Image (tube, rainbow, N blue to C red):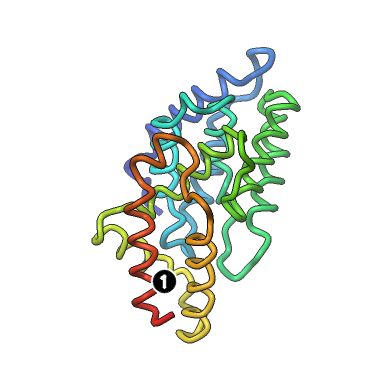
Amino acid sequence: MSEHPSGPALRTRWRETVVRARAEGAGPDPGPYADDLLRRWSEPQRRYHTVDHLVAVLDHVDALAAHAEDADAVRFAAWFHDAVYRPDRSENEERSAHLAELALPELGVDEARTAEVARLVRLTVGHDPAPGDRDGEVLCDADLAVLAGSPHDYALYAAAVRQEYAFVPDAAFHEGRAGVLRQLLGLPRLFRTPLGYERWEAVARRNLTTELELLGA
């Protein structure tokens, strides 16, 4: 498998986050951990949950970082939130959180921050952080920002999601996808940070509504 163009820059970003987060300032080389994560994000069953998605989420976290209580915990959560991803399984978030709980202490990240990262990863099941959960708001906004793409980019996103679920018959996929769209549209706000809400809310709701209509739901 060829190297993703963002691979070297991502490894640098990972190393910088690990170095900042270490409780004692020392620990094993972060490089192999980045390599393992990037291998996971590059697995062949992925069409949307790819390295490109990881880059986009990390970039959005950086843009929203001033809102976070612990921006580096959110960055770690971005790295881990889809590290385990099988479209035919329902426990991806839990397994991804568990991976973070194993890896981060080995790297020298303290117990409290590790627990926060795992909590954030689990939060991506429903993307519905509690009021005042600033780290959760940043991660969920960053993960959902794809919903506010241009019509062309949103169509590419929706098509990639369908490709990940190619094993599901059309009727069943349409029913399940419509349920996800309705759940998102039913949230009082898709985006909880002030910047995210201002930039993305209206466009995302329009895209979701359009997709729901195209599904005939």
| Badge 1 amino acid | Gln
Most foreground residue, 152 or 27: 152
Most foreground residue, 202 or 120: 202
Label 1 sits on residue: 163
Q: Position of residue 144 (x, y in %)?
A: 45, 50
41 displayed left or right of 198 = right
Quadrant containing the N terminus in the rendered view: bottom left
In the image, is residue 94 above or below residue 29? Answer: below
Quadrant containing the C terminus in the rendered view: bottom left
50 displayed left or right of 105 = left
Q: Position of residue 204 (x, y in %)?
A: 37, 55
User: Where is residue 102, by image quadrant?
Assistant: top right
In the image, farthest residue toward the top:
24
Instruction: Determine the residue positioned at 42% across, 30% down.
Output: 62
Instruction: Determine the residue positioned at 55% across, 51% down.
Output: 82
Instruction: Determine the residue positioned at 49% across, 72% down.
Output: 177
89 displayed left or right of 63 = right
Instruction: Determine the residue positioned at 48% across, 61% down.
Output: 185
